[in-house]
Image (tube, grey):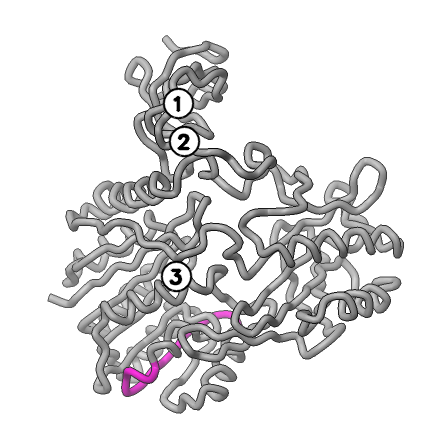
Amino acid sequence: MIKKNDIITLEITDISSDGNGVGKFENIAVFVPMTAVGDICKVKILKVLSSYCFGKIEEILTPSPDRTENLCPNFVKCGGCDFLHITYDAEKAAKKNFVKSCFERIGKIDVPVNDTLSCNKIHRYRNKAQFPVRKDENGKAVTGFFAQRSHRIIPCNDCLLQPELLNEIAEYIVSRLNQLGIKAYDEEKFTGLIRHIYFRYGEKTDQLMVCLVSTKRKVWNIDVLVKDLVNRYPSIETIVLNINDKNTNVILGEENIMLYGNGNIQDVLCDVKVTLSPHSFYQVNREGAENLYTIAKNALCLTKDDILLDLYCGAGTIGLSMAKEVKTLVGVEIIPEAIENAKENAKSNGIDNARFICSDAGKAAQMLVSEGFRPTAIVLDPARKGCDENTLNAVLTMAPARIAMISCNPSTAARDCKYLAENGYKVEFIQPFDMFPRTKHCECVVLLTKQ
């Protein structure tokens, strides 16, 4: 019987969707972080549950051929990356298996899963970065990233997923906070001011947004910091003070105060000019998003007779990238700022066949049904929790010929596709796409057609 603190010899035979290696010992699954398929390790058991347990590497006896040199000194400590220790081919194979397992196990859908596709860049691809700011033991502001499953700051002056410029500016801001006497947030005492540094970067336009998340509206010497940043970094298009005075893990509050510029930046995605505010949804990997949206558009085989509904549309980027292919586009999003961005994006691109509705996806879909709106094609791009049943039922009532589901969570995608498949739709293909290289996250595009 396996017990806590036992040292066992374990062969890793799989990788779970949370990034841990998996092996079997006495018919019990053992999950071990930072391992690769083919590793033979000595593992110390840390936690034992009824049907599985968790352990950590004590010694690698035989390394897997999938192992590669880890380029980041903070990899084991920081909670940002999961796969810096294995080759990229091994990572893509693992992500294909994540998607395949979910659709077979949860969706009960037996459709071949394509090999994982990706963009060209596996490092420096993020156009959004969120750096927590906290007090250290000496009362000084520090930044970096949270350790896994904690809010302990791991200092990191060069994250490999972020452009070098964002890492550099975050370090500079923290140094100036300390020089200007602007206090960092203390999460335990709920005191201090600056709790996050938040960036959005327009890769095509070289426009940068700096958003400082503060517990209060009045920040002493903030004007000096703004002047320093603008003079030092010409890419900065706007600087925003976001107010978050709640005791919460949510990064952004609802109120934005413009300190420099108009609070927005521009970028170009799939030849569509887009305006982005701090709250707008925008894929963090621009090149990956272009590839992903092209897969979805090609799958839908759109024509000038099509009426396209884009549910969970964000700033309208998916639908607007397809608007010129269709007769009419309707987009739905619950965040008001994102809908305003979507309307502005349509106007600035000369797209006059688009309508955007600010509403919960399920309620909007039901309203459109009551209006007699009948799309021929629907794009679903929900958050990680997937679609709610009201939305899926409204989609079924509309009965479009084709549905393209873009999902960042294969588990909820499989669940939602199962519901659609049980009610008259057929899954035609499943395409995993690696939007987030070196992490455990994986997108997929699923095409469903009405039978």
- The residue at 80%/49% (across/down) is 191
Please determine whether, in this image, residue 419 is positioned above or below residue 393: above
Q: Position of residue 43 (x, y in %)?
A: 44, 16
- The residue at 69%/50% (across/down) is 247
Q: Quadrant of residue 376?
A: bottom left
Which numbered tag is attached to residue 372?
Answer: none
Give the CA distance from mark 1 to mark 3.
Answer: 39 Å
Which numbered tag is attached to residue 67?
Answer: 2
Q: Quadrant of residue 264?
A: bottom right
| Residue density around tag 1, few if under 14, some if 14–19, many if 20 or more, within 10 Å | some
Q: Which residues are magenta?
A: 323-336
Nearest the viewer among 202 and 331 is 202
Q: Which amino acid type is marked by label 1?
A: Pro
Is the Cβ of the residue at disc 2 closer than 8 Å to that at disc 1? Answer: yes
Q: Which callout, 2 or 3, points at the residue further toward the start of the chain?
A: 2
Please determine whether, in this image, residue 336 is positioned above or below residue 326: above
Answer left or right for 260 relative to 389: right
Q: Which amino acid type is marked by label 2?
A: Arg
Q: Which callout, 1 or 3, points at the residue further toward the start of the chain?
A: 1
Mark whose residue sits in front, 1 or 3: 1
Q: Which amino acid type is marked by label 3?
A: Pro
Which numbered tag is attached to residue 63?
Answer: 1
Residue at disc 3, secondary structure: loop
User: Can the viewer see residue 213 in this picture?
Assistant: yes
Please determine whether, in this image, residue 82 is positioned above or below residue 211: above
If the image is split into quadrants, where does the C terminus sit? bottom left
User: Can the viewer see residue 336 in this picture?
Assistant: no
If the image is split into quadrants, where does the N terminus sit? top left
Residue to which mark 3 is pinned: 382
Nearest the viewer among 115 and 106 is 115
Q: Is residue 105 magenta?
A: no
